[in-house]
Image (spheres, rainbow, N blue to C red):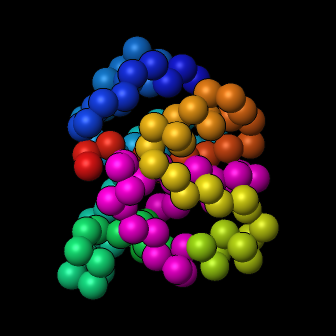
Amino acid sequence: MRLEEFSFGSIQIDGVSYDHDVVIDRGEVRKRKKKASKKFREAFGHTPLSLEEGIPWKCRRLVVGTGTGALPVMQEVQEEAKRRKIELLIVPTAEAIEILKQKADGTNAILHVTC
């Protein structure tokens, strides 16, 4: 998987540009379906990452790119990762991309690209 370009509101993976948040699940890229988390928006000031979403748990490490730091990750997500014995890294998206470029084996990701 080639993570080629990233800028505010856009990411390019394997030659395809995405203008929305993405989930990378065992090498497959899909749109993040955050509708289920919108009910928590008021409490966080932003739609957070919640257990209500399709989190790609089949991995040893999950990298969450928070954009510039705007994407909140609910405590329940962090607790579930710990329960599943999955290393959870919550970092700005630019840093998440660098982590994925260095070693993506056994790693899934959720990348926030819109703020």
Q: Is residue 95 left or right of residue 83?
A: left
What residue is drawn where x is 45% and y is 48%? 92
**Residue at the extreme top:** 15
Considering the image in quadrants, where does the N terminus appear? Answer: top right
90 magenta-colored: no
What residue is drawn where x is 53% and y is 42%? 96
61 magenta-colored: yes
Residue 39 seen:
no
What residue is drawn where x is 21% and y is 81%? 42
Q: Is residue 4 left or right of residue 78?
A: left
Q: Is residue 115 above or below residue 37?
A: above
Residue 17 x %, y %: 31, 24
Quarter of the view holding residue 26: top right
Comparing 56 with 46, the one in front is 46
Q: Main secondary structure of the magenta part?
A: loop
Residue 100 x %, y %: 61, 34
Q: Is residue 2 above or below residue 57?
A: above
Residue 99 x %, y %: 62, 37
Residue 105 seen:
yes
Comparing 3 with 25, the one in front is 3
The residues colored magenta run 54-77
Q: Is residue 36 left or right of residue 64?
A: left
What residue is drawn where x is 68% and y is 29%? 102
Q: Is residue 11 above or below residue 22?
A: above
* Total count of labels: 0
Q: Is residue 10 above or below residue 92?
A: above
Quarter of the view holding residue 58: bottom right
Residue 76 x %, y %: 54, 81
